[in-house]
Image: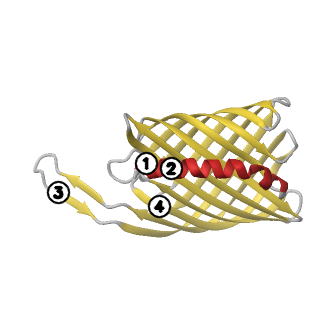
Amino acid sequence: MKHVAKILVSAASVSLVSALPAIAEDGWSGEAALSAGLTTGNTETSEAGLAVDVDRASGAWNFGLQLSGDYGEEDGVESRNRYFLAGDVEHDFNDTMFTFGRASYEVDQFTGFDSRTFVGGGVGWHILDDEDHNWTVRGGPGFKIDEVKRQVTTDANTGAVTIIPASTEESLGAVAQSEYFYAFNEAVSLSNKTNVVYGQESTQINNSIGLTAALNGHLAARVSFDVRHDTSPQPTYEATDTATKFSLVYTLGE
């Protein structure tokens, strides 16, 4: 199975990278990043990843797409296998305020969940909107679906085995996001992205802070630190994962 995952990640990387010029010509802007790093928490492993974050404006409408995948091994054994997909639709009320809809889907083989899905929407604001210094926040209600894995535990004293069957947890939820960007100069910039998905059973909090330096043309180098926290992890799983990544970034559009 781990070899299949590696082949799929490699094929997706080649396909996306080869398609970048065509995507840019079609009016999309954003970035694609190939990364390598170290993860601690549920796993301690080296890993490689691919992330694409693009959007396209059409009048008062804006469409966004985020794709990411991370794969890692420890001593030749698969220890990281996570994939994420999200889409956004925004409509501007004015230069400052907008409404949005969002859907996301996550699969992570090394958590207590087979998958996590969120669909929702709300209102957002451009608090800062300068070319070299901007900050956008958004939030609103939604619906959260967690597919919980089957749990098998063994009592240390009696040796008794307890099996908790897989289940589906559905609940009302909410999403809150913050995206901050500051350019120190034409070559170096700082970004910080925070994403909170609230659910009655658990809340996911993700934060990524990165420092990016332009190399030449559309290429840049980035070092980033990611934190992922679950307020109610499944038994035997850590609440917090961290990842330090070093990435080669290809910028789309202007």
Amino acid at the residue labelled 1: His
Amino acid at the residue labelled 2: Ile
Alpha carbons under labels 3 and 4: distance apart: 25 Å
Which residue is at a point 63% across and 40% down the rendered structure image? 34
User: On the image, numbered disc 3 is attached to which residue?
Assistant: 161
Q: Nearer the viewer, residue 245 or 75?
A: 75
Q: Which residue, as the protein is rendered here, is positioned at the far left?
A: 158
User: On the image, numbered disc 1 is attached to which residue?
Assistant: 3
Amino acid at the residue labelled 4: Ser
Amino acid at the residue labelled 3: Val
User: On the image, numbered disc 2 is attached to which residue?
Assistant: 7
CB atoms of marks 3 and 1 within 8 Å: no
Ranked by sequence position, the earlier of labels 4 and 2 is 2
Alpha carbons under labels 3 and 1: distance apart: 31 Å
Q: Which quadrant is the C terminus positioned in?
A: top right
Give the secondary structure at mark 2: helix
CB atoms of marks 1 and 2 within 8 Å: yes
CB atoms of marks 2 and 3 within 8 Å: no
Ranked by sequence position, the earlier of labels 4 and 1 is 1
Ranked by sequence position, the earlier of labels 3 and 4 is 4
The label nearer to you, 4 versus 2, is 2
